[in-house]
Image: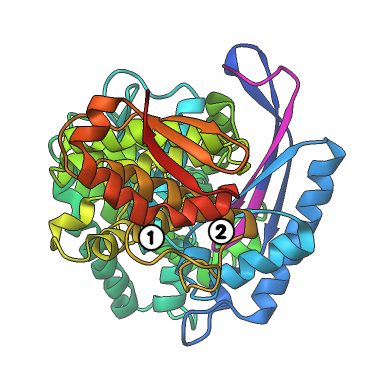
Amino acid sequence: MNLPVGQHIAAVDMGTNSFHMIIAQTEPHGAFRIVDRMKHWVRLGDGVDKRGRLNPASIDRMVDSLKFFKQLAESYDAEMHCIATSAMRDAPNRNAIAKRIRHELGLVVEIVGGEEEARLVYQGVCAEGYIREEPAYIIDIGGGSTEVIVGDKTGLLAAESLNMGARRYSRQFFAAGNYTSRQINMCHHAAASKIQSVANAYTPFDVHAVYGTSGTIRTLADITAQFCNHDDNTHLTRKDLKQTQTKLIDAVKADQLPDNIEAERKNTLVAGSIILQEVMRALGVKSLRVCPSALREGIIFDRINTAGRLPARPIKAATQAMAKRFNLDCSQIKCVTQTSEIIFEAYAKLLSLNHEAYRLLIAACQLHEVGLAMNHKKIHLHGSYIIAHSNLTGVTQRQQQMLATIVRFHRKASPNKSHAMLKNMRSQDIKTTIALAAMLRLAAALNRTKSGEAANPDITEKKKTWQWSFDKTWFESHDVCIWNADQEKRPLSKLVGKPIQFQHKA
């Protein structure tokens, strides 16, 4: 189901070097067109202290930029989606920054992991209609990270986000403006080492096209075409990049690059060129086509095609893949999921739970026993750790934190708002997480014996209690489950305002 035609959506890419916003208007058949755009050079990568935190000056620049973006978006009555990437996700103070932005501007910043960033870039290339039946490589070089992606029209096939970006490597190797042979070689070796560590994962794919996205690659294509006297700046070869590297360095040092190249980008181009050369070499790529769309367009494309709030992306596929990888008990997952759905339906309205909350609960059902991969003792703690530290494609950091917390509290101690896992969450997310953990706790308890026969209560509200009525045969043959659920029902009883009473049907 597509969004109504004529609706405006603003997508903000909060990058390491610059912030970009596009405003798109929806068109028939799921299409969209860009009606406005804004860009600010925020240079978050230059505002990092020794502990990796973003400093107050860079945070102020971020807030000021988003303030202007919000004003423009509001002039179009556009819903606004802010996606933070490498610089924010690497910063230890990222949650405090997001909280300040939410407090001062009323904007929710989604801090996405590397794989989710890669997925959105892939969606942006899809929006251009470039992706066909055959697999294609997509290379995106940002200020702080480089995404290497392979996908076809069925979806994303593989993705890696590497901590090497044009600004990151410029600061690391060329901070003093010294483009010596030694520094250049060091940069080449660092980039080669990063990409070689993951290159083998891409060899099985029979790739028929290669696309380069991001401002760095587009700018390199323009400059290389000028250096080589080519008319075509839509394609870029590794041979041309290598042959023109000396010219590029000389032009940067002498400040003789074309005037249309923004000053903030000029000092990052040498590092960007080196990164691109090494990625292409490791993947066996001789040339690529420049794609004008990337993460921002991917946000719009994703929003239109999910027809829901952006954070409610497909979580199910990521958690199913993890459940399969850890060989979890499919029968038990099915039973716990079935019971959880009944509980959610009974209390969703009362507890103000939306469809995203439903997806998170089903995802938690998928993974509630993933801790068994480490040890049968304290599986809730082990499971929470595994989820929190895994790459879950299609899941934002916010959702991943909620999911890990739900699994953490589905057994043993019940959560409270002062717990470390909850204290940096938004107030509504805390309420949702506590409610879902209470639901999962009871669903897991009612299926404790793993009989393969799910608990299916009829839940009705009485004057003083909530009555959960079970089939008599099931009730009498699952007394251990009923006893266990009696021990675990207090957190949910407290939330729904009345005691929960278990009984069999007459």
The residue pinned by badge 2 equals: 430
Q: Please tell me how crowded label 2 is: few (under 14), some (14-19), or many (20+) other residues with Cα within 10 Å.
A: many
- Image side of residue 244 versus residue 41, left or right: left
- Please name the residue shown 37% across and 63% down the image: 164
Counting from the top left corner in percent of width and height, residue 265 is at 57, 61
Counting from the top left corner in percent of width and height, residue 378 is at 22, 66
- Please name the residue shown 69% across and 79% down the image: 57
Counting from the top left corner in percent of width and height, residue 503 is at 38, 36
Q: Depth check: give the residue in front, 401 or 416.
A: 416
The residue pinned by badge 1 equals: 409
- Please name the residue shown 16% across and 56% down the image: 372
Q: In which quadrant will I find the N terminus? A: top right
- Please name the residue shown 74% across and 60% down the image: 65
Q: Can you see residue 411?
A: yes
Question: Hey, which quadrant is residue 429 in on the image?
Answer: bottom right
Q: Earlier in the sequence, mark 1 or mark 2?
A: 1
Secondary structure beneath dot 1 equals loop
Q: Which residue is farthest top?
A: 29
Residue 108 tag number: none
- Image side of residue 119 versus residue 309, left or right: left
Q: Which residue is farthest bottom?
A: 50
**Vertically, is 306 above or below 495?**
above
Question: Hey, which quadrant is residue 63 in on the image?
Answer: bottom right
Q: Can you see residue 236?
A: no
> Callout 1, which amino acid?
Phe
Q: Nearer the viewer, mark 1 or mark 2?
A: 1
Which stretch appears magenta?
1-20
Secondary structure beneath dot 2 equals helix
Q: Which residue is farthest front?
A: 506
